[in-house]
Each structure stands twice: as C-alpha cells, then as structure tokens.
Amino acid sequence: MPRNNKGKGDNSRAIPASRVSRFARMARMVGGVAGGMLAEGGRQLSAGNRPKAKDMLLTPANARRVAEQLSTMRGAAMKVGQILSMDTGEFLPRELADILARLRDDAQRMPPQQLQRAMSDAYGPDWELLFYDFQMKPLAAASIGQVHRTLSPDGRDIVLKVQYPGVADSINSDVDNIASLLRLSGLLPADIDIQPLLDDAKVQLKDETDYLKEAEFLEAFGQLLHADQRFVVPQVLPELTHRNVLAMTYVSGTSIEGVIDLPQAERDRVMTTLIELMLLEFFKLRMVQTDPNFSNYQYRQDTGQIVLLDFGATRRFKASFVKDYKRLARAAITGDQAKVVAACERLGYSMGEEGSDYQNMVLQFLDLALEPLRLDIDYDFAHSDMAHNISKMGGEVASFRDSWQVPPSAAVYFHRKVGGMFMLASRLKARVNVYQLMQRWLV
C-alpha cells in the first residue's frame, strides 16, 4: 500500500506529457521572455539609455523564466540545457551558461496523480497490490525520472525509478524546440554549428529513456564489479522492470561529498578508486557511465565502500576512438606536439594549419587540460589552478570561431565524465597520481 508522505514545502508540479502541451509550455516561455524584454527596454529608455537587444534579453528575470520552464518540462529540454552548459560553455555568453547551469541540479517531482498514472501504465490499475509501503515522496528527482522506495512482493527492500510521462515521446521535438529558441533569441552564436551534437543527443536521450536498456547496463556493471569489494551496485529485478519503470534493490549510503570530512588518506583513496573505475570503463570495457552528477555516487561510512547509482547515461565507445585516445595520452605525456596534433585530428578535432595561432592555442589548451595526466606526482586537485587558467583562455578561444568546430560527440560525452571526476576530486580536496594510474593502460 502506498504511503502518502507529502510534507511541507512540496515542490511537485505536473509535467506536460503531450507534444501539444510541451509546445505550449515552450511558447509560454518565449512569450514571457519577450514580455520581459519589452519591460526592460521601457525601463532603460525612461532612464535615458538606449539598450541593446542582448542587454534586454539577458536579465535576471528572463534567466529565471528560462530555467524554471526547462526545469518544469524535464526530459530532453532539461538535458539539452545540461549538455550545452557543460560542453560548449567557453563559446556561449556567460549569462546563458549561468542559466543552463542551473538545470544541473534543479528538478521538480511529479504530483501524486501523475505518478499514479505512470505506475498504472507499467503495472496495471491494481499496482498498489504489488507493493507494500510504497513511498509517494521520491528519494530523488532528476531530468528523466524519479526514484521511490518500497517493498517488493517477496519482501525485499527495493526502489522503483519511474519515468516522467511524455518524456520519451517528446525527445526530438524538445531538442529541436530548445535549439530553435536559443537560435532565435540570439543567445546561441549563429556561427556555432551544434547540430551534430544535438543529433547525437537525441540518440543518447532515447537510450536513456529505455529503462530496459539501463537494466542491461546495470547488470553488466554488477557482473564486472561483483568481486571488487570497493563497490556496491544495486541488483535489477527483471520481473518488475518495464520500459518506463526500473526496479532494483535498495542500497544504503550517504552523499559522496560527505567524504570531505574524512582524513586526507581516505579522501585520496576514494578518489583514486573512482578514477581507476573511470579508466577501466573507458580503456577496457569501452562502456562509460557519462553522467557527471555527484549524486550517482554514495559512500558507506562503516565499510568505506562506494555505491554506484544510475546507469542511464552509459555510452559505448568504438575501439578506434579509445585507441586514438591512448595515442593522445602517450603524446601528451612525452610532450610530442606533432603526435598530439595527429591524435586529435584522428579523434575528429579541428586543429587548424600547422604553426597557426589557432593550432598553438589549442595545443596550449590541451597542455593545461591534460596537466594531471602529464605530471608524475600526487596531483593536488584542491589547489590546482588548471580550471582557472582554462577559463581565462575562454576569451582567446572565442576569437577563433572561424576555425573552431563542435568537438566530436564521443569526446563530448567522455569529457563530461572526466570533467565530473575533476570537479569531485576538487570538492573532496583529494590528491591522486593520475599519471601512475594511466600507465597500465598505455603499454
């Protein structure tokens, strides 16, 4: 039987499920932004100023409108914002990047009536008879679904990941609508071609909304790590799993960010373990969980084990892509710039003419980004100035838009994982010898 544990401060909001309602939501957002522009323009004119369109558009009020509507729609609309904010941030207006960055952690849950319909679609109208103590308030809510704790028919403590209605069917239209909005608004520079990234995002998002596919990834990681006592992976319940509901055993843990309060040696061990896992995923399995969200990891204080959650964003990589990355890593470590350029071009990067200012800038950028890999030291992520230096290069990078191209999609998704690891290592103030961890994969 379900437990109605809706409390104060409830932030549930119905998700527009049909294409018509989602388009209406998008139109409402555009109208609100346009109205905000007119109001801001009037204020500026009355003050004796002659405002530019960009200044009227990028107001705090409009930023809230865009972020709120995309958050309410969830699904592809929210995911596209997350992808753009992380992977093309150096080429977007700072204001737009800030708007999109708000979507990484901002998701509202669906109300009980909509949840009831989603459960009925999966298990039938009598779904409540299947589960005992079903908790209506989710443990977590994200861009594609939310997680509820309950007891299975055989008494096991489990969780159900329930997909938001309409998300899977609206991927193509949501992605196209968001891209059009950004183009028409002038927020996305016209000279940046993000279409390949958007096309790939549609494919990736369709995979993420197929919970049967996520169940396969979850089982694969469980089999891979079953003998590794450092990790805990939930078990899939195939008999209760559907395309829009994923059933798995409940595993306890606390926020991985709480590791910051532990001794330096434990912080270093935890982060070393996670980077080792990332390298194993990429170089051996060629199957990487690419979502950088910290909530995908939890920590068990009593055992020191790391709980791995959410494999929906798992992505397979071609053997040729992984091989070329090995070449890039070897070249970066030895400082062979000619081989760095060759490896990058094989990966699909635009490197420009030999000796050009653009190529020199890209090489400088790579030299910064690969710093933890190049140095045979316990790299101190908390005191690294790498992120700051890369950010400072943003203005210089933007001046080469004629030469720059959107990176290959495979690289974008892998870099989401790498970037997430860097941010987590910085948050935990960890020290890790990444150079030594890489050596086993470069032989």
Image (cartoon, helix red, strand yellow):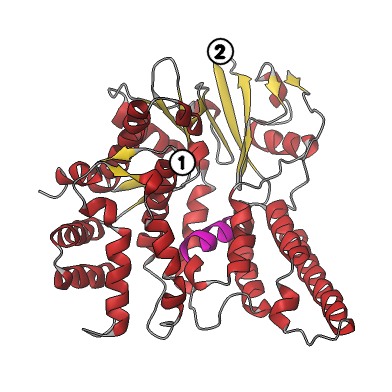
149 lies above or below 292: above
Circle 1 residue: 427
Q: Would you say the residues marked 2 and 1 are in contact, meaning their CB atoms lie under 8 Å apart?
A: no
Q: Residue at x 77, y 24 (%)?
A: 5
Say if the magenta span includes residue 84: yes
**Marks 2 and 1, the one that precedes in the sequence:** 2
Give the quadrant of residue 33. Answer: bottom right
Say if the magenta span includes residue 397: no
In this rendering, would 28 be left or right of 320? right
Q: Nearer the viewer, residue 312 or 364?
A: 364
Q: Which residues are magenta?
A: 79-88
Q: Nearer the viewer, residue 227 or 210?
A: 227
Circle 2 residue: 154
The x and y percentages for residue 80 are 56, 60
The kind of residue tagged 1 is Arg
The x and y percentages for residue 61 are 78, 64
**Main secondary structure along the magenta-highlighted residues:** helix
